[in-house]
Image (cartoon, grey):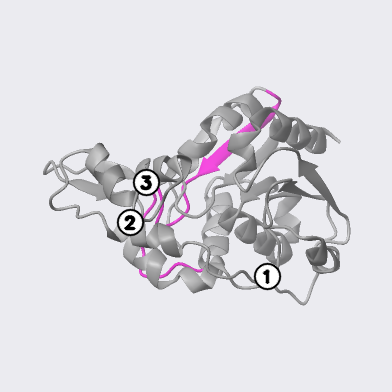
Amino acid sequence: MVQLHYKQYGSGSTKLIILHGFLGSLDNWHTLATEWGKSGCTVYALDQRNHGKSPHTATHTIADMVDDLYHFMQQLHIEKAIIIGHSMGGKVAMQFALSYPMHTQKLIVADMSPRAYKHGHDEVFKAIKSIDLNTIQSRKEAEDAMKTYLGDFGTRQFILKNLERAENGQYRWKFNFETLYHDYENILEETTSANSYGGAVLFLKGSLSQYIRETDEPMIHQLFPSARICTVEQAGHWLHAEQPQLFSKQVLEFIND
């Protein structure tokens, strides 16, 4: 268990906790968190362990992050919250609801399924490894090094948001690359439980993404019998960034339902 860095938005009676995806941070959710904080929610955007400003640890598993979330809620005396998680954060959110249903008011899973996943970050890892933090002098140099492995401009910019200058003037990563790389397999595992979560659940999938497939639906409904699966049109895996208005509309309708 670690003490997570977080940012609070709003002061409404409904508690909403946001869990970002792999290599992300709470900063990715600032615009939406601000909007939801003005819509009757107290929003807590978290940096998960080994990301953002939260502590770096020797392990990185879904169980670790579920434990972190439970202790975060205990620390802030949050009895019950709506949990929203994207990608890796979706895995954490699902497992938390199954493990602590009494503390889960509702569950929102953004473009993630309970099934096991194959490696999807190999080129990203190569791109990160290609940057020599001891010698680069600018973010432009870092991006140029990444281009060999990451042709997509948006993905490069997403990764580069994690690059910052240390006190000695050299660049460093905000995320704990060594642990994330070493424990990567752990976040790809299938979500399993002897129990199901009977509360209200919304799965949001990007119409251009393959992270939630039709063949996943039986597993989803087995673990989450009340789940609704809705599509955000013209959005890929980063649906909250690509179609923020459509995404936010569906989230707020579900929260207020």
Q: Could you tell me the amino acid type at mark 2?
A: Ile
Disc 2 to disc 1: CB gap under 8 Å: no
Q: Position of residue 196 (x, y in %)?
A: 81, 67
Q: Which residue is mark 2?
A: 128
> Does the image show residue 176?
no
Q: Position of residue 59 (x, y in %)?
A: 41, 70
Q: Would you say the magenta stretch is mainly helix, strand or loop? A: loop
Please say if 191 is above or below 68: below
For marks 2 and 1, give the CA distance: 28 Å
- Relative to 176, is 95 on the left or the right? right
Which numbered disc, 2 or 1, marks the residue closer to the eye? 2
Q: Which residues are magenta?
A: 39-61
Q: Residue at x 62, y 27 (%)?
A: 37
Kindly give the residue lying farthest to the top in the view shown: 38
Which of the two labelled residues, at mark 2 and mark 3, occupies the earlier sequence position? 3
> Magenta stretch containing residue 77, yes or no?
no
Q: Could you tell me the amino acid type at mark 3?
A: Lys
Please say if 61 is above or below 2: below
Front in this rendered view, residue 95 or 233: 233
Q: Which residue is mark 3?
A: 53
